[in-house]
Amino acid sequence: NSYRLLILPGDGIGPEVMAEVRRVAEWFRDRRALPIDLRQRHFGLASWQAHGSLMPDETWAEIEAADAILFGAMDSLDQAIRIPPSERRKGSLLRLRKNLDTFANLRPIRAVPGLLDASTLKREVVDGVDLVFVRELTGGVYFGEPRGVETLSDGRERGVNTHVYTSDEVERVARFAFELARRRRADGKPGRVHSVDKSNVMEAGAMWRRIVQRVHDADYADIELHHMLADNCAMQLIRWPRQFDVIVTDNLFGDLLSDCGAMITGSLGMLPSASLSARGGASNRRRALYEPIHGSAPDIAGRGIANPLAAILSFGMCLRETMEMADEADRLERAVDAVLAAGARTADLAAPGKPHLSTAAMGDAVLDALGRP
Ligand code: NAI
Ligand code: MG
């Protein structure tokens, strides 16, 4: 009875960072005897090039059978390559998230003591930051209908996207955030949720705020709840990030604010994520997709210099959430911390002109640190 993990490396630096994830996962399988069954398939443009399809039936079957997906990154499809629109829809990352119903996207941002010098913020502002975004991932403006571009009779174009949430969608992500805050409180964190919206100008935002408050008052009155407007949150993240524990917000604000929060650590190449569904079905299984928050980084792809730590830490989240092996997840995080404390830096983290490690050398360093007692 093993965990079936499907690696989808994707495009650009995806395959480069996922090669290191594979080595780390194999280390846990072989050295810690964890029951891991690793599979791998092409995804994104890589799939189009290899199979002439963005989502061959075999890939979908592997996705369906997997306990978790370890995803790298994919190139946007708006390139010169001609891919029919029906294929594009089948193979998009948005579609994959929607099909798996992974509505809760966790994005932890933790200041690593050995890495404070890489942050663009002052050391005393960054030191001790340990927060997590819960970004709603399957609703909001990314999926709202109607959408599209039409040409008006006078020749002007009109582009439309719609920001839509239903009360059940807000409620389930709010519950998820409150449960997470409780779990974190058991580990000594404050047990505090900031719910972020634009209730002052958006109807769906006002509804969001009302429902989060109702869920809180009914079932989570032990958790400290604050409502914050999204623009203020962007500012507060940079001014005083230590005030945050759990931040729950919609799909679009979560996307923007977590990239903003990334600079607390100093690089997009440090931030992992987990996208989780509700538990359900006969096996009470939770669908899960683990991926670094960065993209395919075409500007550095193919050079072997990408930072693999965001992807490696995403596998750490898989150990914690899907495999429920908190000790093993801690072991991996400690190894990453130790490597950074010892001064290991990929190009994105190194000071300009300072020597830096390749992607594979950073992977070696993590494996090395894992191997030490
Ligand atoms: P990006 O995250 O790929 O890159 C932004 C900047 O951060 C670049 O300068 C890049 O070199 C750097 N960077 C990112 N990850 C890094 C790492 N691990 N190590 C070192 N440096 C790193 O975002 P960008 O440039 O906006 O998008 C590039 C492509 O990726 C686009 O085609 C976009 O659609 C796609 N993308 C895919 C995502 C996904 O698959 N989940 C998410 C975001 C973008
Ligand atoms: Mg983003």
Image: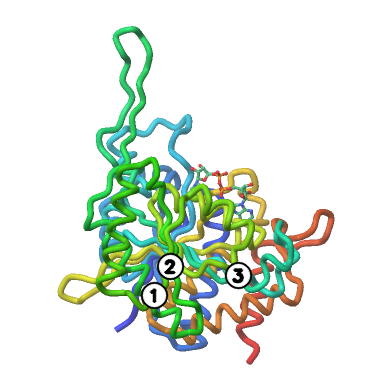
Residue 62 visible to the viewer? no
Question: Does residue 249 appear left or right of residue 60 in this picture?
Answer: right
Q: Position of residue 153 (x, y in %)?
A: 29, 9
* Type of the residue with mark 1: Ile
How far from the left and from the top, in percent, is residue 314?
A: 49, 67
Q: Residues within 10 Å of mark 3 (few under 14, many from 20)?
A: many
- Element type at mark 2: strand
Please give the residue where the numbered disc 1 appears in the rendered image.
223
Give residue 129's mark.
3
On screen, residue 116 above or below 233? below
Query: Observer-nearest residue: 203 or 106?
Result: 203
Vertical comparison of 224 with 2: above or below = above
State the residue at coordinates (52%, 66%): 244
Residue 237 visible in image: yes
How are the colours assigned in the image? rainbow
- Check whether the beta carbons of the residues at disc 1 and disc 2 lie within 8 A of each other: yes
Query: Of the residues shown, which amino acid type is indicated by label 2?
Result: Val
Q: Label 3 sits on what residue type?
A: Val
Q: Residue at x 76, y 72 (%)?
A: 343
Residue 351's place in the image compared with 82, above or below, is below
Question: At 62% across and 86% down in the image, what residue appears?
Answer: 371
Q: Nearer the viewer, mark 1 or mark 3?
A: 1
Q: Residues within 10 Å of mark 2 (few under 14, many from 20)?
A: many
Q: Quadrant of the N terminus?
A: bottom left
**Location of mark 2 (residue):** 193
Secondary structure beneath label 3: loop
Of the image marks 3 and 2, the number of the one nearer the N terminus: 3
